Image (cartoon, rainbow, N blue to C red):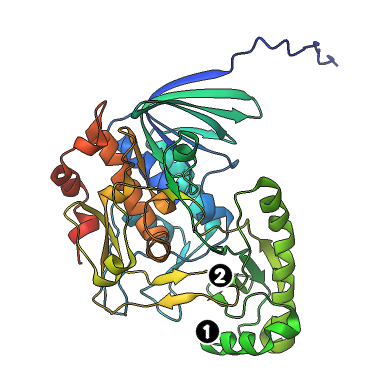
Amino acid sequence: MNATRTKQIRNDGSEKGWKIQTDICVVGAGIAGITAAIEAARAGRKVILLDSQPQLGGQTFSSCIGTFCGFFTNGTGGFQVTHRIADELFQDLRNAGGLFDNPANPFLVPYYNETLFLRWAEKKVLEAGVQVLLGATVRKVHREGRRILSLEAVTRYGEVIIRADGYVDASGDAVVAWLAGLTCNMPEEGAIYGSIMFLLENIDYSTPVPTEQALMQRMTERATAYGLSRKKGLLFYTPQRPGGVAYGNMTHVDTPLDPLLASRISITGKDQVDRVLEFLKSEYPANFRAASVRVYAQTGIRQTRWISGVRQLGLEDVRSGTRFADAVARTAWPVELHDHGDGYVWEVFDDNHVHYIPLAALLSPEADNYATCGRCIDADVAALSSVRVMGPCMATGSAAAHSLVLAGEGSVHSIDVRKLQEILRDNLDRTD
């Protein structure tokens, strides 16, 4: 047998890390960043997509959300409002057995298998030729005047320096803008709560499960007895999947921009999930007597910090369905504001309602080669709660990518908006 040989090594400080030159750098590999990266690559640009997590998917995978929100108008006879890569996602997942009808509303909020979504995202990104950098935390951004020049990321393997013509900030917390010294927004008072979602298994679907209204009423009545911090929660039943599973959105947790507190909450927040399970077992034993938690999800974050854009989308713009001259995305998702511990604001719009997102909300007035998407875009607290879900995240990801593609080495503030809207026309005008 040949023994494996070893050699001794020592870090003498001479390693300079990795340097990458690219056309477009996308920071954040959630559903918005994935969309932006694929769109830019398909437009012929060299793209790198990086994320601090060890896998793609962001909250769509790791937070165990289980529902595709914001892709359709309200009611049962509406239409899809976000297309392009979203069409591929729905078709591919359905073909793979990973997309399910919502029993309560088969059209509005389809359910999905998060593991199959992850594999879909990985394959699509690589097929598009996107270079991927995972486990990379951005620690410094270099800006000269109105242009971002480069960013530095730290990985377990060493430092990576990326220089690009353009940058898409899909980080969720506007980390590129923050580190570049661009003006940002955050809630002035109080907190916007996140959730630790979970996946239950061994649910007995042979008897009728509690309805959404009945469950919320029982939670409101019995929350104190079980130590539940949230008095209105949801279970998304998926009897189509083997194992008797359902997704739970029944907790509220703080999501501070503080590394120690955020880390602690990711652990202590699971106590709320355990209390929810105790509540379900005791109050609905016919369905949940044998239920257990299969997955405690990563903390789901709704709103923390976002850019101060050229224009801020306001609540009245959302309510009135204002179609801006520079509209680049649309949705009909309700105002879903989790700003108090007991429950949340849920303001649903009429079946024919659609509201729009302007390009100006994706752009910083202080930078020429930078665009945001997802929950980094500029909106007031209430308006942002209606445009930070998956459908508009994908739509703004498309818009951010193509605004930088059209800008090239110039400014996103000088592009032909009509040309951008022509590219995005299915996400603005299609009603079939």
For the residue carrying disc 2, how many other residues have a C-alpha within 10 Å: few (<14), some (14-19), or many (20+)?
Answer: some
For the residue carrying disc 1, how many other residues have a C-alpha within 10 Å: few (<14), some (14-19), or many (20+)?
Answer: some
Which amino acid, by three-letter code, is at mark 1? Glu
Give the mark, 2 or 1, whose residue is nearer the N terminus.
1
Picture layout, residue 313 above or below residue 338: above
Q: Is residue 91 visible?
A: no
Which amino acid, by three-letter code, is at mark 2? Arg
Q: Nearer the viewer, residue 109 or 407?
A: 407
Residue under label 1: 212
Q: Position of residue 230 (x, y in %)?
A: 62, 76
Q: Position of residue 112 (x, y in %)?
A: 48, 63
- State how far apart marks 2 and 1 are (Cα): 20 Å
Q: Position of residue 270 (x, y in %)?
A: 71, 64
Compared across the picture, whether 233 is left or right of 331 comes to right
The residue drawn where x is 77% and y is 12% is 10
Give me the disc on residue 241: 2
Mark 1: secondary structure: helix
